Image (cartoon, grey):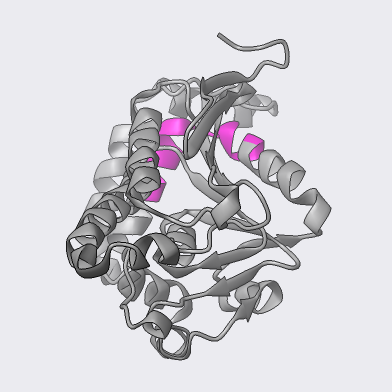
Amino acid sequence: MPNDDGIDRLVTSGPVLLDLHPQGVAHIRLNRAESSNGMNVELLRALHDTVMRCHSEPRVRVVILSGEGKNFCGGGDVRDFASKGEGLPYYLRQATAYLQIAASALMRLNAPVIASVHGVAAGGGGLGLVCASDVVVATASAKFLAGATRVGMAPDAGVSVSLARIVGLRRAMEILLTNRVVGAQEALTLGLVNRVVPDDELASASLAFAQELAAGAPLALAATKRMLWNGVGLSVEAALPEEARTVSELSGSADAREGLAAVIERRPAKFTGR
């Protein structure tokens, strides 16, 4: 049940927290601040479970993804990895499996996902989740780092494909091979983030962006998100049949009728997701 502030605390303890704000804004928070939200199997399993809960929660219209403490996510928990010794390959198979399905679940979620980034977003955990989100709001001091090859690893969470699609092949190649730090303003120029805000305005800016999206037509936003994720790399001609099918399907919804009426009557639309 919602508290007095209208927020429903769905997951209140553990490595990943989940709140549901008014207007259907879900907030997933990585909760290992002491390790810069470094990812281990426990956190990754919890992240997957939390994203899937958002899939099954009909009230969710938008998701904000953020990290507690000083950083969004420092990537894999290297101390945890090092402690596994010769068992590390097996452990990383578990970790990468959960990371992959969590990243995929974010992309396939009907609700738009906003990554709200402060501090460092590094590795498959940090940069990977940024690339798997639909839009990104970052603080002016945020930094982005691939980091994988620096520790003898390779990109994961789909970054080997998603980053190149977002910033282009040559820029992705440089970022992944050199592990150089990308600042917020450069990330904005590259298209890796959508908005850069002052450090003390991240939470309010992310929530305002989420509320803006939550006021949209849920079925239309979900269909548009799906077509964009599926259509990257297709020719325009290959995308046309899916666009035509989706537009025809949406035209029969109550939201489409409400949207047309609102335009004609010159008033804000009230979408219900039906």
Query: Would residue 63 be found to the left or right of residue 265 on screen?
Result: left
Measuring 52% from the left and 63% from the top, which residue is drawn there?
Answer: 74
**Residue 76 shows up from this direction:** no
Q: Position of residue 62 (x, y in %)?
A: 52, 36
Viewer-side residue, 59 vs 20: 20
**Which region shows up in magenta?**
211-225
Is residue 219 rendered magenta in the image?
yes
In this picture, is 39 found above or below 4?
Answer: below
Tell me how many marks there are: 0
Q: Where is residue 110 in the image (x, y as percent from the top left)?
A: 38, 38
Query: Would residue 259 be found to the left or right of residue 196 on screen?
Result: left
Quarter of the image with the C terminus is top left
Query: Would residue 266 be found to the left or right of residue 36 on screen?
Result: right
Viewer-side residue, 74 vs 201: 74
In this picture, is 178 found above or below 92?
Answer: below
Is residue 181 rendered magenta in the image?
no
Query: Would residue 76 be found to the left or right of residue 100 on screen?
Result: right
Measuring 51% from the left and 33% from the top, which residue is drawn there?
Answer: 17
Measuring 56% from the left and 21% from the top, which residue is drawn there?
Answer: 9
**Residue 147 shows up from this direction:** yes
Viewer-side residue, 72 vs 135: 72
Q: Where is residue 162 in the image (x, y as percent from the top left)?
A: 37, 69
Q: Where is residue 246 in the image (x, y as percent from the top left)?
A: 29, 42
Prevalent SS, magenta region: helix
Quarter of the image with the N terminus is top right
